[in-house]
Image (cartoon, rainbow, N blue to C red):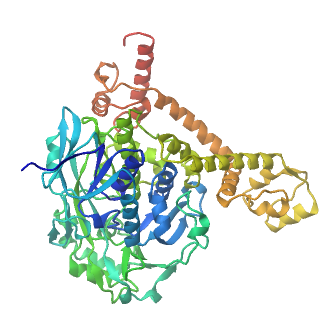
Amino acid sequence: MPNLEETYDIVVVGAGHAGCEAALACARLGMETIVFTVSVDSIALMPCNPNIGGSSKGHLVRELDALGGEMGRNIDKTFIQSKMLNESKGPAVHSLRAQADKQDYSRQMRRTLENTDHLTVRQAEVTEIMVEDHQIAGVRTFSGAVYRAKAVVLCTGTYLKARCIYGDVSNYTGPNGLQAANHLTDSLIANGIEMFRFKTGTPARVDKRSIDFSKMEEQFGDERVVPFSFSTDPESVQKEQVSCWLTYTNENTHEIIRGNLDRSPLFSGAIEGTGPRYCPSIEDKVVKFPDKNRHQVFVEPEGLYTNEMYLGGMSSSLPEDVQYAMYRTVPGLENVKVVRNAYAIEYDCINSLQLKPSLEFKAIRGLFSGGQFNGSSGYEEAAVQGFMAGVNAAMEILGREPFVLDRSQAYIGVLIDDLVTKENHEPYRMMTSRAEYRLLLRQDNADLRLRAIGHEIGLVDDATYEKTLQKERDIAAEVERLESTNVGANARVQDFLERYGSTPLKTGATMAELVRRPELNYFMLTEIDPNRPELPEDTAKQVDINIKYEGYLRRQQQQVAQFKKLESKKLSPDFDYSTVGSLRREAVQKLNQHKPASIGQASRISGVSPADISVLLVHLEQMRHGKND
C-alpha cells in the first residue's frame, strides 16, 4: 500500500519559538505552509525560564515585532509581570522583560497558528530530508509519509537525539519529558551536514506552598507597563501584576556543591555536549567563581494556573539528593518541595558556518534553518532566526532577493552575522556588548529602524506603516521646534532651573539646549514650555533621546558609514583566495573555507587579520582596474 504523499510550498520542522515565527512568516506571505511538531501540545513551549526579553533579548523581540513577527504580540497578551531593565543606565542598554504565564503563552500562540490562512499544523516526527541534485525536495516522516516542498525550514530546537541528565540518571527524551527526535540527525549527516553536540540546562521547579517568602526580597513589576509590541495599545497592558522574589545562595550551598562535584555529570565526563558560557549551571558558577560567597536566585511564578515556581540562576545536573540538599540551604527554601528536578539536556545542532547570511545552507538550495538548531540559546534568539529563515524561504520561492539585515541595522543582524561568520563552539547568546552600534540599535526605536523593511517584505500592513511614518514626522517637527524655541532668563525659568539644580541662564537659550543638560530632560520642561504639543509617550521619548544624545548618535552614524563601505565591497563565492599574493596561509585557509560575501564579513572571520584585509582591498582594486596581482 503506497504511503501518503502531499505537496506544500514550504515545510517547517519544529513548532517552538523559531518554528512558530518561520511558519507564520511563510503563511502570511501567501506560501502554502505545513509545520510539524512532535506534540501539538508543545507549540511555543517554554521548557526553561518563564520570561520573554531581558538584557539585549528585549531588543530582539521588539525588532521582530517591528518586522511583523508574533512574539511581542503574544507576550503582551499573556504576561503576568513586566519590567524595563537597566533604567539607571543609558538608553542603549534599556531592555524590556516580561514574566509569562507559560501555559497561556503556548495556548495563545497555538491559537494564532491554527487560525492563520495557508498554514497547516501537523503532529508527526520528521525523520528524513529529501534532497535531489543539491536541491531540497521535501521531507519524510516516521510513518513514511512524504511531504514535497520547494523549501524546508529546520527549527528542531533541543529535540535532536536529546538526552536529559541529572546525576547518573539519563533519559533519552526532549525537554520536559517530551519525545525526542532520534532519526533526523542521520539523514542530515548523510547529506553532508556537519553536526555539533551542545548542552543547556534548567533549574528545578518547586512548590510555591513550601516557600517562605518572608526571607526573600519581593520584586515588583513596573508601575507603568511598556508593551513589547508597537501595535499593542499601551492602556491595554496596564493590569495587576504578580511578584517575583530574590534570594541568594551561601557558603553552605557552595560547600554541598563542591563536596559532590564527583557526582556531577558535568565534571565526570558523562555530558559530552558543550554548554553556554554565559548561562552556567550553579556548579559551574561555584567552580569558576570561588571568591564569590553568594549567587542570586530568582524565584519566579510559572503562571497563574499553577503553584510551580522557577528557581532562576540555579540550573544544575547534580543528583536528585544533592539538589534537595543544596536548595534547602537557600533562605526561604529550607523546606522546599521539588515538583520537577533540575536537569541538563544534550542535543544535536549544526555548525552554523555552513549557512549563508540568509540562513540557507550553502550546499543544499532551499534548505533553511533557525533557532537552537543553529547553535544559539534562548527563546528570543530562536524566534528571530526562525522569522528570518521563514521569510527567506518565501523570498526564494517568490524569486525575490534574500532578506539580510547587517550589523548596523539590527541586533538580529549582529546575531546572524556572528553565527554565520564566527566559530561558535558553545551555544551563542545575544548580549548588548556584541553590538558595535548599540546606541543606534536601541529597543525603543526598533519600529523607526525596521517598520519600513517589514512593510516592504509584506508583513506590515499599510495602516501600521503609516502610523510609524506619522511618528517620524512628529519627532522631526518637535525636535525642530525645540531647536528654534528660545527661552529668556526670566524669573520663572530661573526658578525652574534652580529647583532642579541646573545653572541659571545669563542670556537666552533654546529649549533643545536645556534638554541637553544632564540634570534635565524633555519631560521636565513641560512647566516652562506652554506650547509643547500632546505627544504619545514613546514619541516624546524619541524627541528626548535624539536631542540629548545628538553628538553621540552623529558619531555612531559616521562609524556606520565606514562599516557600510566595507560591506559594499562584495566578494564572489567562487573566488580562490590562494591566488592572492601576500595573504597569510591561515587567512587563505579560513577565507576559502568561509567564502565571505563581503570584505566586511571577511574582516570578522577569526584568523583573518587587518593586514590580510588590506591585502585583499589592494587585490580588489587591481582587479577593478584590470591588472593582475
- Is residue 614 visible to the viewer in this orientation of the structure? yes
Check the picture and name the quadrant holding the C terminus: top left
Which quadrant of the figure has residue 36?
A: bottom left
Identify which residue is drawn at 17% across, 62% down.
Answer: 269
Q: In the rendering, at what x and y percent does residue 213 appear?
A: 44, 87
Horizontal arrangement in the rendering, residue 126 relative to residue 86 (left or right): left
Q: State left or right for residue 224 relative to residue 229.
A: right
> Viewer-proximal residue, 452 or 113?
113
Residue extending farthest to the right is 490
Residue 427 in sight from this viewpoint: no
Name the residue: 52% across, 48% down: 460
Q: Is residue 68 above or below residue 204?
A: above
Classify residue 318 as left or right of residue 51.
left
Residue 508 image point, x, y percent: 89, 51
Q: Residue at x 79, y 54 (%)?
A: 514
Residue drawn at (42%, 19%) of the image: 620
Query: Does 326 appear above or below 192?
Result: below
Q: Nearer the viewer, residue 307 or 261?
A: 307
- Image position, residue 48 (x, y; %): 34, 67
Nearer to us in this view, 414 or 499: 414
In the rendered image, which quarter is residue 9 located in? top left
Q: Is residue 336 above or below residue 377?
A: below
Return the residue found at the far left: 1
